[in-house]
Amino acid sequence: MSFQDGLSGLNAAARNLDVIGNNVANSSTVGAKTSRAEFSDVYANALSGSGTGAVGIGVAVSSIAQQFTQGDISTTQNPMDMAINGRGFFRTSLNGAVQYTRNGQFRMDKDGFIVNAQGANLTGYSADSAGKIQGGAPNPLQISQADISPKATATTAAQFNLDAGAAIPSATFSSTDATSYNNSNSMSVYDSLGRQHQVTLYYAKTSANNWALYGSADGTELPTKPLTNLAFDATGSLTAPAAPFSVTIPVGADAGSNLTFTANVSTATQFGAPFSTTNVTQDGYGSGRLSGFSADTSGVIVGRYTNGQTKALGQVVLANFVNPQGLTPLGNNAWSEGAGSGQPTLGVPGTGTLGPLQSQALENSNVDLTGELVNMITAQRVYQANAQTIKTHDQLLQTIVNLR
């Protein structure tokens, strides 16, 4: 009579309780994946081959398999937090060793690198000074703290309506004489050093359906008078100028003396309604400091600057495996490539089989705490039952020993 069956059952049940206990302990661990113990029966090999009457000799734990199902996603207030909504792993580098994780709790270190609590660098594609994402091999992502350079205004556009019933001014145009023009609107433009200049456009009716457009910069009238003439047809649509016209303003010798940009008024109208300006745009801006950043669904880290501009600072790269259960757990919410996982397939979030990213969010553990507590009760009963078989074997053996 053998105690092997009961002993193997006790060992297997104890191992199962270890797995369940680990799951319960990590029920609040961000990115943690639940595990399950998988069992197999054990039979002794027979010299003459297997037979139909063979009796097993117990149970063995064949594997501890992690379940890479999606965990719930919860929002946070940290712009560096990221969650993968689907398949894939964050790719990190720790002292040159590549690791993979589902834990998106990241922060920025003193050098601007994006790291996790263990100091592993998040890897991805870097961006050049213009914000263009560079491909190639993934490298540790570093957030540049450099100011964004100013951009001189090159194009402007204004959308407005001139009152078809307006009277023709009798006085010669002067920016200081409000009776010499009908209406005006203003816009800000920037020189090559990022300095702001105020440009004002004045509209003076010259005849039916015809207007003269004058300008001033920083309170000084521009020498070209008028800058252009506006003509409208009987429906109030603009017929001239047919293309954007150039405007040159003085900006100082240190910025090249003059700034020339184009002005587009093709959307201007002349209806029987009061003068109104609907929209004024220009493409220049001054220098700006980095004020914040966040990642979009494709993993592009977008920086926000104090001048209202945005620029890509890098892009997160994800990795996927044919068999995630073949990954080797390293602890600290990290795995490494294993013999059974296959080689990693790299890509940006939201492409192929990789899930999109969600910024300011984290993936919770996929542990079902209620289910684990039920499994714990079951495993306890299994342990008690196997202990009972050993006790029964002991009683039977004692009976045999006591035979006379």
Image (tube, rainbow, N blue to C red):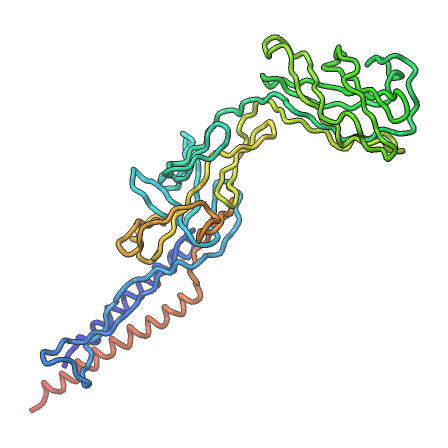
Can residue 104 be seen here? The reply is yes
4 displayed left or right of 12 = left
When asked about the image quadrant of residue 193, the answer is: top right
Name the residue located 45 percent from the left edge and 57 percent from the top edge: 70
Name the foreground residue: 388 vs 371: 371
Name the foreground residue: 262 vs 235: 235
Can residue 220 be seen here? The reply is no
Classify the position of the N terminus by image quarter: bottom left
Residue 14, given in percent of the width and then of the height, sits at: 27, 67
Total of numbered circles in the picture?
0
Up the image or down, 390 lies above or below 301; here it is below
Up the image or down, 16 lies above or below 341; here it is below
When asked about the image quadrant of residue 229, the answer is: top right
Extreme bottom residue here? 404
Up the image or down, 296 lies above or below 243; here it is below
Name the residue located 64 percent from the left edge and 20 percent from the top edge: 190
Residue 298, given in percent of the width and then of the height, sits at: 50, 44
Classify the position of the C terminus by image quarter: bottom left
Extreme left residue here? 404
Residue 102, given in percent of the width and then of the height, sits at: 41, 50
When asked about the image quadrant of residue 95, the answer is: top left
Residue 58, given in percent of the width and then of the height, sits at: 21, 75
Name the residue located 56 percent from the left edge and 25 percent from the top edge: 288
